[in-house]
Amino acid sequence: MRGHLLLALLVGGLGGCSRSKPAQPAAPPPEATNQVPAQGVPGCTLYGAPARSGEVPDVLPELSGLAASQRHPGAFWAHNDSGNAFEVFALDAKGAVLARLVLTGAEPRDMEDVTVGPCAPGESRTCVYLADIGDNFARRAQVRLYRFPEPEALEDATVPVEVLPFTYPGGPRDAESVVIDARSGRLAVISKSLDSLGDVFALDGLHAGAPIQAKKLGTLTAPQGMDRATTAASLHPSGERLLVRTYSRAYELRRAGASRLEDLLGGQLVEVPSGSQAQAEAITYLQDGNGYLLGTEFTGQPLWLIRCR
């Protein structure tokens, strides 16, 4: 969102008003040759170079989250952040709009990310979770997720949401990232910090009604401590890999055999390919986990698709 641009400048991101189009970014970097191969985990061993798959459509001038649909192959759920209508869009990887859902039942303040996974532990039905967790000045007494089932068909509709409130131990936090474990339905958020890649908080027992308190699981630190301010994240379908996005880079946390987020946090964090974008705020694994898609604020900016080498 526009209120985050000062933070972006402080950590090396690009600033500017989200209502105007910046200059087109440079061509993507050549295929990385210094990648750390993934060993013993599902998904790509090495990633290829970013390929421009499409561009951010006009309906998403402040694109802040992307998540691969688990019900509709090739579709991605996307949304704007604060100051925009309460709605979510289904896109393809080219940025073409497949459906527009008008949401009811809440008044969001600052939606920052989206994820898709089980509607409840053990359920095969999948839900979309929108994270109203932005809090630039750490003043919100409670924040919340919004949940609704993935629709059977990709068509325009009006959809009610459930409100799932929570608080943080020790007081308010700014955050822009939400993930879900496809195996268990467990949700977690990652805070946005100038000191690290953020603290990871599990949302155990999250439900409509009274807020629950998040549980801190650990802190993410970039290699050599050279990056910070996580703007988006995505958990691999296997639960053994986690993508983390900042304004300038993308990282992947890996740990073979990780059965819980706590296990994964003890894994290896490495940099992975990311295309140049004006204000990088969205990342998601593809539905099959073999690659990922990168999004950004500003209409007309590229959507970068990274697949296995």
Image (tube, grey):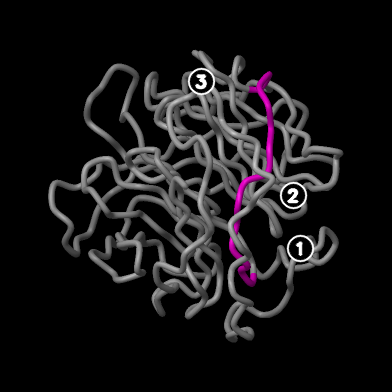
Graded by Cα atoms within 10 Å as few (under 14), some (14 to 19) or many (20 or more), the crowding at tag 1 reads many
Main secondary-structure element of the magenta-colored stretch: loop
Nearest the viewer among 70 and 288 is 288
Span highlighted in magenta in the image: 265-278
Q: Which amino acid does label 3 sit on?
A: Gly
Q: Mark 3 points at which residue?
A: 40
Local SS, label 2: loop
Q: Name the residue under label 1.
A: 8
Relative to residue 278, is residue 242 depicted above or below? above
The picture places residue 230, in percent across and down from the top left corner, at 68, 47
The residue that appears at 35% across and 62% down in the rendered structure is 93
Graded by Cα atoms within 10 Å as few (under 14), some (14 to 19) or many (20 or more), the crowding at tag 2 reads many
Q: Name the residue under label 2.
A: 229
Does label 3 or label 2 sit earlier along the sequence? 3
How far apart in space, not on screen, are marks 2 and 1 (Cα)?
Answer: 8 Å
The picture places residue 13, in percent across and down from the top left corner, at 75, 65
Graded by Cα atoms within 10 Å as few (under 14), some (14 to 19) or many (20 or more), the crowding at tag 3 reads few
The residue that appears at 59% across and 35% down in the rendered structure is 189
Relative to residue 31, is residue 218 depicted above or below? above
Does label 2 or label 1 sit earlier along the sequence? 1
The residue that appears at 35% across and 50% down in the rendered structure is 105
On residue 68, the disc is none
Nearest the viewer among 172 and 239 is 239
How far apart in space, not on screen, are marks 3 and 2 (Cα)?
Answer: 29 Å
Give left or right: position of 11 versus 40: right
Q: In which quarter of the image is residue 248?
A: bottom right
